Image: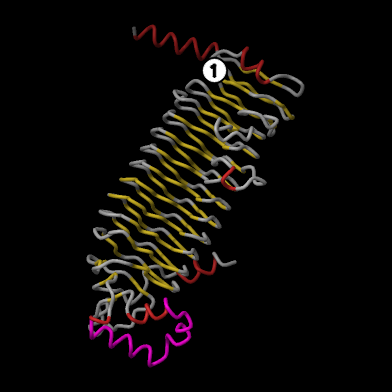
């Protein structure tokens, strides 16, 4: 049996051939004539085709040829495992959301597909990936049908019911959502850039994924994590998003660390989130630093910097929630002191005090925030807890921020 397996792989390697397609020739015909393992080189040119790949081959562009679907159906459809697509301009899919028209459609069972270093432009969905495991989507530039309204567009990369995907270094814009992830687990999302979208990334019902070193800007929402568990979200940058930078909604047992969330409507939107660790993030210059809602009590929140947010915390509940229980956080509007010089304030920080509520109800009070009268009102509220609404309370607030370069980060996203 071992001899037969070795003989099969040896025969496959020997039998693999290189084929070429030039302008005026058919890519579809070249695929039909190819054998498993062949490499088809597509020379620079403009090809109108709908390519169906039903054998494990490599389709490789030479000097960036263009394959156009001419506004109909899918441009390339992959039906079998171990297919590689690279170096092509793939454009002009159909616009049928029901049929999920895509630049590259990876069918159920087409495992281990690799789509690398392509331009996918004016496609409804850049890539639709369904029930295909261990795919690699790397280094692609994906631009949607920007003349359509957002709701009529597809997503840049759609993952449904997959395992082990690697989504790396893609640049996505003008689709509906940049990356939509549903019922997909044990995936890696790293180095992607997403802008001018509804959500940069939209997660639903997915577990054990890594979201790392991605940048999301000028969207409605940067990163939306919804109905998920066991996520690791770190070293990401979310800025200039009109609604939120990072949404944590109905999320458990996840790690959110070392992210930079700047200049958004809400920095962190935390809703129905429990048993998560949120640490060492920079949340600065947002209209609301943190919007905390719906019983999000049992989380470890430490080592974060909340700096120059117009409103540090928006919180509605009937009891205090305790943050900073292990290491504390930095709050740029903290007015306490540090008599023993240990780096932590001697009195707790409490968001949503009487001054904060005045600012919500009467925004012009911001003009008086540094006045002696307002500071006195804040100190009186600390002495008389009955004047204070339930709030986020940090028992050991830092006197200095962890992120020494926070002002540079804030300035960089405002250019």
Q: Give the quadrant of residue 259.
A: bottom left
- Image coordinates of residue 141 in percent, x first then y, are 60, 42
Numbered disc total: 1
Query: Residue at position x 53%, y 12% from top?
Result: 14
- Name the residue: 54% across, 66% down: 412
Characterize the magenta stretch by its predominant secondary structure: helix
Q: Position of residue 131 (x, y in %)?
A: 43, 28
Q: Say above or below: 34 vs 100.
A: above
Q: Is residue 89 visible?
A: no
Q: Is residue 159 above or below residue 306?
A: above
Q: Is residue 278 in sight in this rendering? A: yes
Specify few, some or many for label 1: CA neighbours under 10 Å numbering under 14, 14-19, or 20 or more: some
| Residue sitting at x 68%, y 34% | 64
394 vs 64: above or below: below
Residue identified by numbered label 1: 54
Q: Quadrant of residue 18?
A: top right
Looking at the image, which is closer to me, 13 or 403? 403
Residue at (34% x, 41% y) in the render: 207
Give the residues in magenta: 360-385
């Amino acid at each position: 049996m071992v001899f037969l397996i070795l003989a099969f792989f040896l025969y496959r390697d020997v039998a693999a051939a290189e084929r070429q397609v030039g302008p005026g020739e058919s890519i579809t015909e070249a695929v039909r004539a190819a054998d498993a393992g062949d490499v088809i080189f597509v020379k620079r040119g403009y090809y109108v085709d709908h390519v169906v790949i039903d054998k494990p081959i490599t389709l490789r562009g030479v000097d960036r040829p263009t394959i156009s679907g001419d506004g109909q159906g899918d441009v390339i459809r992959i039906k079998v495992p171990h297919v590689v697509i690279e170096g092509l301009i793939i454009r002009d899919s159909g616009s049928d959301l029901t049929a999920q028209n895509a630049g590259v459609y990876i069918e159920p069972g087409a495992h281990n597909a690799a789509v690398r270093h392509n331009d996918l432009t004016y496609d409804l969905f850049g890539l639709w990936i369904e029930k295909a495991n261990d795919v690699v989507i790397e280094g692609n530039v994906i631009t949607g049908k920007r003349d359509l309204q957002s709701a009529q567009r597809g997503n840049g990369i759609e993952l449904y019911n997959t395992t082990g995907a690697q989504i790396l270094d893609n640049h996505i814009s003008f689709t509906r959502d940049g990356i939509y992830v549903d019922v997909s687990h044990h995936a890696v999302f790293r180095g992607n850039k997403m802008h001018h979208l509804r959500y940069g990334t939209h997660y639903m019902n997915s577990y054990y994924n890594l979201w790392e070193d991605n940048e999301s800007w000028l969207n409605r929402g940067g990163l939306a994590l919804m109905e998920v568990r066991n996520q690791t979200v770190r070293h990401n940058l979310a800025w200039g998003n009109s609604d939120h930078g990072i949404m944590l909604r109905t999320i458990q047992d996840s790690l959110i660390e070392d992210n930079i969330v700047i200049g958004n409507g809400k920095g962190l939107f935390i809703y129905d989130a429990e048993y998560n660790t949120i640490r060492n993030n920079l949340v600065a210059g947002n209209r609301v630093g943190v919007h905390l809602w719906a019983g999000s009590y049992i989380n470890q929140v430490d080592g974060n910097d909340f700096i120059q947010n117009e409103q540090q915390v928006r919180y509605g509940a009937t009891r205090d929630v305790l943050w900073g229980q292990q290491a504390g956080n930095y709050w740029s509007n903290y007015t306490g002191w540090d008599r023993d010089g240990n780096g932590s304030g001697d009195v707790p920080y409490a968001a949503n005090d009487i001054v904060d509520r005045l600012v919500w109800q009467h925004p012009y009070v911001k003009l008086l925030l540094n006045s002696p009268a307002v500071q006195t009102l804040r100190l009186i509220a600390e002495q008389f807890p009955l004047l204070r609404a339930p709030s986020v309370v940090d028992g050991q607030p830092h006197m200095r921020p962890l992120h020494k370069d926070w002002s540079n980060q804030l300035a960089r996203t405002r250019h």
